[in-house]
Amino acid sequence: MSEIVLEEISALSAIYCGEGEFEVLSLSENGTTVMIQTGVQDAAELETHLRLVFDLPITYPSCLPSLSVSSEELSRAHCKALRDKILDEAQKHLSEPMIHHLLLWTQQNLHNLIGHPKPPTSDELHPRSEDTTTDGRIWTMLLHLDHMRAKNKYVKIVEKWVTDLKLCGRLMFLGKIILILLQGDRDSIRDYLVLQKTCKVDVDSSGKRCKEKMMSVLCETILPLGHVFYI
């Protein structure tokens, strides 16, 4: 990761410091993925919640980040249109850190960008994020979990997420080492990372439900076309 990206991530973590507002989802030789959740109020004080996931390749900011946008209040079509307009704005800021600017620009212009959207239909209440990378290639990611206190419940949650996202997955216990191997569409793996980071999947030492704070990405790679691992 370049120094300029490190400085940008540090600044973003300080600005978006509320619970669940900012997460580094993955960090590997292929680049960095960060998630930011924010809300925008309109004149009637109705709030639209946005989740933006930025994939920063190793050549960023000399090239554009990949971006996905999702929202409980917006339809897939509105999320896609919003993403495209954010990326159009990003074109104006190549070669400089741009994420904070894009977030502020989105907050200031959201309702002009999407107009007055109708509520999402029943099949859009939990929309898949719209992304710039849909090449159909197979991605593989290896995750490390520090511990599981509520093991049975944790395992059931992981199994449900993998099934719902149509991923191939394997949960491995190697002594005290806990690994999760995922394979499938890159968008789905990103969605899994968001769930793993933002949902309460375990319990703390006092027995209260808690989020996964100590997950790390050990490896992320893409398989050549025509190659598939069965896991």
Image (tube, rainbow, N blue to C red):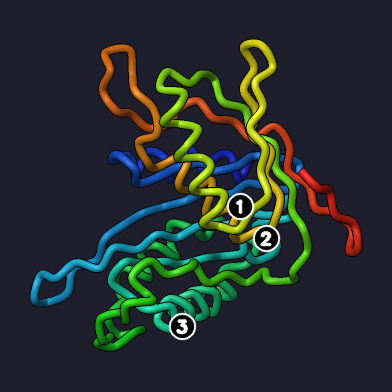
Q: Can you tell which of label 1 and label 3 is closer to the viewer? A: 1
Quarter of the image for the C terminus: give it.
top right
Left or right of 215, for residue 200: left
Of mark 1 and mark 3, the one earlier in the sequence is 3
Q: Is residue 201 visible?
A: yes
- Tags 3 and 2 touching, CB below 8 Å: no
Q: Is residue 1 visible?
A: no
Query: Circle 1 sits on which residue?
Result: 189
Please tell me whether residue 167 is drawn above or below residue 15 in the rendered image. Answer: below
Residue 136 location in percent, x, y? 74, 69
Q: Identity of the amino acid at label 2?
A: Asp
Name the residue type under label 1: Ile
Q: CA distance from mark 1 to mark 3?
A: 23 Å
Q: Residues within 10 Å of mark 3 (few under 14, many from 20)?
A: some
- According to the picture, the residue beneath numbered tag 2 turns out to be 185
Q: Are marks 1 and 2 in contact (CB under 8 Å)?
A: yes
Check the image and name the residue furthest to the left.
44
> 10 Å neighbourhood of mark 1: few (<14), some, or many (≥20)?
many
Label 3, on which residue?
Answer: 81
Image side of residue 77 versus residue 71, left or right: right
Q: Which secondary structure lies at badge 1? A: helix
Mark 3 vs 2, N-terminal side: 3
Q: CA distance from mark 3 to mark 2?
A: 22 Å
Separation of residues labelled 1 and 2 (CA atoms):
6 Å
Which residue does the image show at 69% across and 38% down from the upper left? 181
x, y percent for residue 151 = 46, 23
Q: How many marks?
A: 3
Residue type pointed to by label 3: Ala
In the figure, residue 62 lies in which quadrant? bottom right
In-front residue for pair 189/33: 189
